[in-house]
Image (spheres, rainbow, N blue to C red):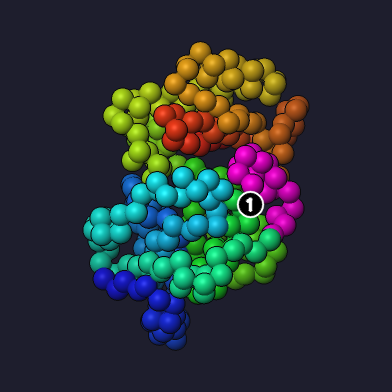
Amino acid sequence: MLIFNNKAGLTKVLSDYRNVKTTIGFVPTMGALHAGHLSLLERSVRENGVTVISIFVNPTQFNNPEDLEKYPRTLEADVEKIKTVSDDIIVFAPTVNEMYDGNTISAHFSFDGLENQMEGAFRPGHFDGVGTIVKKLFEIVQPANAYFGEKDFQQLQIVKKLVEKEKLPVHVVGCPITREENGLAMSSRNQRLSTGEKDAAAFIYQTLKEARQRFENESPAEVTAYVYDAFAARPEFTMDYFEIAAEDDLKPATVKENRKYRAFVAVFLSNVRLIDNISLN
């Protein structure tokens, strides 16, 4: 398995693959890999001649320094998990200095308003950080296809908009959420939850499923009120937001139209922030 910490070595190897017209697939991650990440890798391996995974905890997308400090870093364990998918996957695990050349700041992006909704409102500067690092990684790897999980659905839409606006020749592929047996969306942050807290966190997906059922006959406002009441009755949770929004522009839904809608939620459980979403159509 090839593991690179520097851009030059990675670009040289990928250039050799391009010379023989091999399709490059790419899975960008922040490490602490779980079955959701591995499902993205499996799809990339199926659909491309070679797959690259990046493992990089990007400081510019964290607006909370404590969250950045506590984010799990498990490179050795991650590499072992990657090997279970394929020994031929290329790992890119750069340092902050390698990615930012000593100037760790974000560029500023306009994503046509996508960046102002939900996560953008609660995490100022977050999507500038996401846009900055994804653009850098796309320019280094130059993949034909890049794979992102739908758990971070807003991020997925942001990346698609980035590719459109920056005219990057990358096909962005959204992949379904991978869940624990109890329905909890898999996330690297789940590692910070105790077994009891993981059991409690199943309530998030249960509530989203109930919201989807209610959405068939109730207005967005009625469903939203139900969800807030449901979480208010569970004091172990602290709500950031619940939002019903159209998938294309992520603007809050006030009335139901002939569009695709999703319900989005962000909550704290024992100081761990968890997000999830579900299609309502």
Q: Is residue 208 above or below residue 8?
A: above
Is 25 magenta? The answer is no
Residue 87 in the image: above or below residue 202: below
What residue is shown at x 65% (from left), y 31% (from top)?
Answer: 244
Task: Say whether residue 229 is left or right of residue 20.
Answer: right
Can residue 268 be seen by looking at this rendering?
yes
Q: Say few, some or many: other residues with alpha carbon within 10 Å of mark 1 (under 14 / 14 to 19 / 20 or more).
A: many
Quadrant holding the N terminus: bottom left
Element on which disc 1 rests: loop
For the record, the magenta segment spans: 109-125
Q: Nearer the viewer, residue 70 or 81?
A: 70
Residue 128 falls in which quadrant of the image?
Answer: bottom right
**Mark 1 = which residue?**
125
Which residue is located at x 31 percent, y 71 percent? 3
Q: Nearer the viewer, residue 172 or 27?
A: 27
Amino acid type at image mark 1: Gly
Determine which quarter of the picture holds residue 223: top right
- Please identify the quarter of the rendering in which residue 74 is found: bottom left
**Front residue (pair 70, 139):** 70
Quadrant of the image containing the C terminus: top right
Residue 192 pos. (x, y %):
35, 38
Image point (58%, 31%), residue name: 240
Q: Is 217 placed above or below 90 here?
A: above
Asked if residue 48 shows in the view, the reply is no
